[in-house]
Structures are given as structure tokens and as C-alpha cells.
Amino acid sequence: MTSSPNSQDIQTLFNDIAPIYDQMNDWLSFGIHRVWKLMAVKWSNPQPFDTALDLCCGTGDLTFLMAKQIFQGKVIGVDFSSELLAEAEKKQQNKSLNSEIQWLETDVLNLPFEDNSFDCATMGYGLRNVTDIPACLLEIQRVLKPQAKVAILDFHKPSEDWVANSQKWYLDNVVVKIADFLGTSSEYAYIYPSLERFPNGESQIQLGLNAGFSQGIHYPLFGGIMGILVLTK
């Protein structure tokens, strides 16, 4: 069993990779992450005038998609990497959006919001990296309004051995080598150990129910390499 990094390690890691974060997401997912993000936003069920939350927002892809879906509402993008949020603010300058966006640097394990504040939420590639998944789900459940949904998109370790072996080969021989060329190989070497620690879909549903959500469903994507967990308060 590999040891889990602490929150300071993770924060430093994402600050370091911020300049190439979008580029590496393209290589990690063959560019298909854009489709998966659209699916996550759809399953979070945003409506006009909603107040929405995008957790671990990174450079804002899901935040921007949410802001296009919500007419005259508000979307708050939360991340604890100041460098990723700076990249998100740069990208926003070229966006035409229907809703207000607010960026907030804070920890998803200790959100500075009142109970029952948000109509919907998304989280992209964040749950796998938090230091306490049950605590994170409890906090999301707390800030959502009754009946609200959160859609959580992340990489997974596939259950089929041949798919899992192919994924590991690709990470080791393509992604990390590209990262090495860009001077960030040590940062991207964390991905496979994080997949090894990450609960499977059924376990994620149970963790959601344990956190107080009333319903949960997990959608495996791309041969189980990716998945979206949808939880309803």
C-alpha cells in the first residue's frame, strides 16, 4: 500500500504543474475529457438562476461549462492552488458566459459556506486527491440544498486487468515521459499511486450514502478508466 501525500504536498504539486495543467489533461485523456466534463455538468442538473459550486476547479473548465448552462445565476469555482486559479482567471478573459463567476482559494475539506447554500455542484479530478474522502463528501453534502446533485468526475483503476495494465503502460511510458520533457515528471508520477488508493465505483456510492446523500449512482466511462459519481442530497 502506498502512503498518501499530505495536503501541503498536494497543494505544492498543483501549483507547480499549473502552467501545463490543461495540456497534460489533453494527453491523459486523449482530449476526451471535454466530453466527460460536459456529461458531469449535465448530471449535476443545473437550472436557470441557480447558485452552483465547482470544487477542485483547477483552471475552470467545469466552472465555465456550468456558467454557460445557468442563466443569470452564479458559479463559485473553488481550489486551494493559487496558481491554478490564476490560470482560470486568465482563461475567463476570453469567455462569453451567462452567469457570474467567483474564484475562491480554499480547502474543500473546510468550505466557508453556510449549510444548504448550493443548487448543484461538480468536482473534476479532485476527489482522488483529497486527504480525506469521507470528510470531503460530508462537506459537499452539508453545503448542498435538499434534492441538489453533485457530479464527481475522476480517473479510476479499471477492473479488467488488461485495461488496467494498458493504462499503467500509457501513464509510465507516455504521460510521465512527456512530463519529464517539460520538467515535471516527479509531479505526474503521483497519478498511478493515487489510482491504486482510489475507491471503486460501488465503494464511492457507499461512501456517499454514509455521508448523508439519499441516492448515488456511478457511471463507468472509457472501459472503466474514467467514472462519474452522481450523488443526490
Image (cartoon, rainbow, N blue to C red):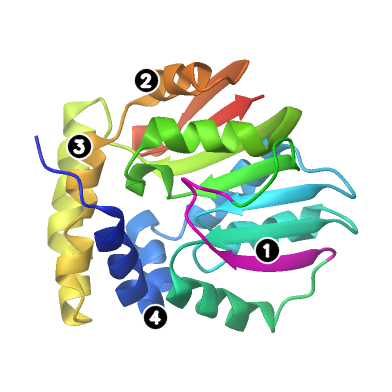
**Residue 101 in magenta?**
yes
Type of the residue with mark 4: Pro
Q: Please determine whether, in this image, residue 152 is positioned above or below residue 219.
A: below
Sort mark 3 into few (<14), some (14-19) or many (20+) by Cα contacts within 10 Å.
Answer: some
In which quarter of the view is residue 80 placed? Answer: bottom left
N-terminal label among 2 and 1: 1
Tell whether label 2 touches label 3 (CB within 8 Å). no
Is label 4 in a helix, a strand or a loop?
helix
Label 1 vs label 4: CA separation? 18 Å
Q: Residue at x 62, y 60 (%)?
A: 77
The residue at which mark 1 appears reads as: 64
Residue 19 circle label: 4
Q: Please determine whether, in this image, residue 223 is positioned above or below residue 111.
A: above
Is label 2 in a helix, a strand or a loop?
helix
Asked if residue 67 lies left or right of residue 164, the reply is right
The magenta stretch spans which residues?
98-111
Can residue 228 be seen at all in this image of the molecule?
no
Residue 196 circle label: 3
Q: Residue at x 60, y 31 (%)?
A: 141
Residue 203 circle label: 2
Type of the residue with mark 2: Ser
